[in-house]
Image (tube, grey):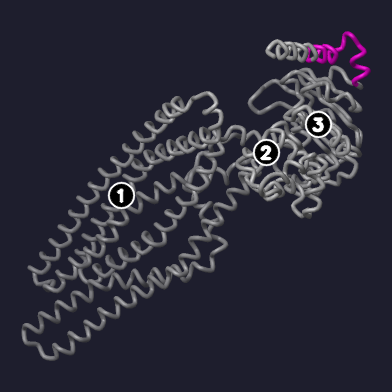
């Protein structure tokens, strides 16, 4: 499954995701629920105390006895409520801060761990910038999501339920009026946000992802943009993407504004009906002036929370829409997974066997391999030769288990690689790719990537074997030099030598070379070939050969064509056969090389 085939996310998925994130912090729930609950209930009592205060003032004006003591007592209750409310709310925030930050930590660390383990196919179909944006946006959207639940929706529910309960306890009619108007307001808010706002904000989130992916792609490829003078063209392309995002986002926010206006009208209707009912009860002698003040004050308190509930339901749904991508990462079922009960690979010799392997890529019907069998002996040096698409790269990907075979098995030292842990498999194989990937870290860290516990002496020794030491020590910071994103601060040949040093230090029984010297100048290539001779000694080595002149010394050359080995043998044996496919490829490259030299001579 690729990233473009995003699973449909529903409310149950959001609930499961939330439960998973919150489960490690269950110990905080009692404090959060009780603290915020009692603070909200204290807020509910303010209108009650306000009514008492008005009644006390009214009694004082009427000349009632003991009015001073009564006023002082009620005022003290009012101040005490304020104190309790702020103490509980702000005290709970100390716990909430830990809870919220730890939730974000769980999301970003686990999302990173999951995405790292997704298949090569998934990453090939995903924009790196878009993936990063989805993780960070999902993390902060969850922050908004849980803020809305604990800080707003939960206290709102306490206030609304408590207020309606008080209304019913004093006047049944007022209780029903309050319940009906609050239900109408909340019902419309939920319907409008879920059915109108959420789909529009989901489209806005998708457009935002495209903006981030385009920016990352263009900025990463800035050197190519400059090389071809395409700055203006990229700006125009980005303007199209940004214009789509702008139109979709404006439409979403304008729609949300209209919905908000309707909610405000409903709040006005609720106030009119509640206060009107209170005045009606007062006119019939069933309520006092203080009761009317209580109802008005209760409406003001509820309106404050309901005003928030409108905004917060909107924010909640928007956050849920923006969480969809990161939740899809958690739901994603990868094609290559570690089997239950997998054991570490015991690869001491490095024998590789393809046993009647059948394999086809997920997006293609034709098989690359069909009933394919091959044995590579421990310590044997193999070169893979063939035209593009013949199956060479697929071969090494299957050895690394970047894809799973559909038929047969791939075995290393007798163990089916599907039955071993992925970590132990990958640690048994050192790779020097044609385009080495370096991290924006120090040169020493990059060399030690496959052997992080290596000492500085071991790192230097590996660099010397790769003929990288001299250029490294010539840099101002030597082995502590940061190489830049993807190693951009180093030349192609320097990056390649660092990658070779990394393979030297990893000391794996199996070595894969994707024409590891192709990026080097002729002088460096001579020394690197010498270094590789020492590196491959005693190791099973697979070389994907692009230049046939570099593989003369291997034990066996395998000539691939459409997923089949059409020829195999030593360089001398294959080149001696005038009708061999290998000789045709070799002669073709020799002619190309002669032609290139002639062009250079003419230019000089």
Residue under label 1: 189
Residue 574 located within the stretch drawn in magenta: yes
Residue occupying the far left of the picture: 62
Number of marks in the rendered image? 3
Residue underneath mark 3: 408
Whether residue 117 sits left or right of residue 247 in the image: it is: right
Q: Quadrant location of residue 167?
A: bottom left
Asked if one can make out residue 420 in the rendered structure from this viewpoint, the answer is: no
Q: Could you tell me residue 554's position as x and y percent?
A: 89, 27
The residue stretch that appears in magenta: 571-589
Q: Identify the mark nearer the N-term, 1 or 3.
A: 1
**Quadrant location of the C terminus in the rendered image:** top right
Q: Farthest residue in the top direction?
A: 579
Residue closer to the observer: 452 or 390: 452
The mark that comes first in sequence, 1 or 2, is: 1
Q: Earlier in the sequence, mark 2 or mark 3?
A: 3
Q: Classify 47 as above or below 318.
A: below
Residue under label 2, please give it.
437
């Amino acid at each position: 499954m690729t990233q473009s085939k995003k699973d449909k996310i529903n409310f149950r998925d959001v609930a499961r995701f939330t439960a998973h994130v919150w489960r490690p912090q269950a110990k905080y729930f009692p404090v959060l629920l009780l603290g915020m609950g009692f603070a909200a209930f204290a807020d509910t009592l303010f209108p009650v105390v306000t009514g008492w205060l008005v009644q006390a003032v009214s009694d004082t004006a009427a000349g009632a006895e003991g009015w001073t003591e009564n006023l002082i007592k009620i005022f003290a209750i009012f101040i005490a409520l304020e104190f309790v409310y702020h103490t509980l709310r702000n005290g709970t925030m100390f716990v909430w801060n830990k809870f919220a930050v730890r939730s974000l930590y769980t999301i970003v660390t686990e999302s990173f761990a999951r995405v790292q383990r997704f298949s090569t196919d998934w990453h090939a179909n995903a924009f790196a910038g878009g993936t990063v944006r989805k993780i960070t946006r999902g993390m902060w959207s969850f922050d908004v999501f849980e803020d809305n639940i604990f800080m707003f929706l939960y206290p709102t529910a306490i206030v609304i339920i408590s207020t309606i309960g008080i209304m019913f306890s004093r006047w049944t009619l007022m209780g029903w009026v309050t319940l009906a108007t609050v239900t109408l307001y909340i019902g419309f808010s939920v319907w409008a946000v879920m059915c109108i706002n959420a789909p529009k904000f989901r489209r806005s989130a998708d457009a935002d992802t495209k903006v981030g992916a385009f920016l990352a792609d263009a900025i990463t490829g800035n050197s190519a943009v400059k090389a071809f003078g395409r700055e203006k063209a990229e700006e125009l392309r980005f303007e199209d993407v940004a214009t789509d995002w702008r139109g979709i986002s404006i439409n979403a926010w304008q729609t949300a504004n209209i919905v908000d206006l309707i909610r405000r009208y409903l709040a006005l209707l609720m106030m009119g009906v509640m206060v009107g009912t209170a005045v009606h009860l007062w006119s019939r002698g069933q309520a006092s002036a203080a009761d009317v003040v209580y109802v008005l004050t209760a409406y003001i308190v509820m309106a404050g929370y309901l005003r928030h509930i409108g905004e917060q339901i909107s924010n909640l749904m928007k956050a849920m829409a923006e969480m969809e991508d990161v939740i899809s990462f958690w739901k994603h079922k990868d094609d290559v997974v570690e089997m239950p009960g997998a054991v570490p690979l015991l690869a001491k010799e490095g024998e590789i066997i393809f046993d009647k392997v059948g394999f086809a890529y997920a997006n293609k019907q034709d098989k690359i391999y069909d009933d394919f069998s091959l044995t590579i002996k421990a310590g044997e040096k193999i070169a893979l030769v063939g035209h593009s698409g013949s199956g060479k790269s697929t071969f090494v990907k299957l050895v690394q288990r970047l894809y799973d075979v559909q038929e047969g098995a791939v075995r290393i030292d007798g163990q089916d690689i599907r039955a071993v842990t992925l970590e132990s498999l990958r640690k048994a194989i050192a790779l020097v790719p044609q385009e080495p990937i370096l991290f924006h870290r120090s040169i020493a860290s990059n060399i030690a990537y496959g052997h992080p516990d290596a000492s500085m002496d071991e790192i230097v020794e590996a660099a010397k074997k790769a003929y990288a030491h001299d250029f490294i020590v010539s840099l101002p910071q030597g082995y502590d030099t940061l190489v830049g994103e993807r190693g951009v601060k180093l030349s192609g040949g320097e990056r390649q030598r660092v990658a070779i040093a990394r393979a030297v230090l990893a000391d794996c029984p199996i070595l894969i070379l994707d024409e590891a010297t192709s990026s080097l100048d002729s002088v460096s290539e001579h020394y690197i070939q010498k270094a590789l001779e020492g590196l491959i000694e005693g190791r099973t080595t697979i070389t994907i050969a692009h230049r046939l002149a570099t593989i003369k010394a291997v034990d066996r050359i395998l000539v691939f064509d459409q997923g089949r080995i059409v020829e195999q043998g030593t360089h001398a044996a294959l080149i001696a056969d005038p009708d061999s496919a290998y000789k045709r490829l070799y002669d073709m490259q020799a002619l190309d090389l002669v032609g290139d030299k002639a062009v250079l001579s003419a230019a000089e």
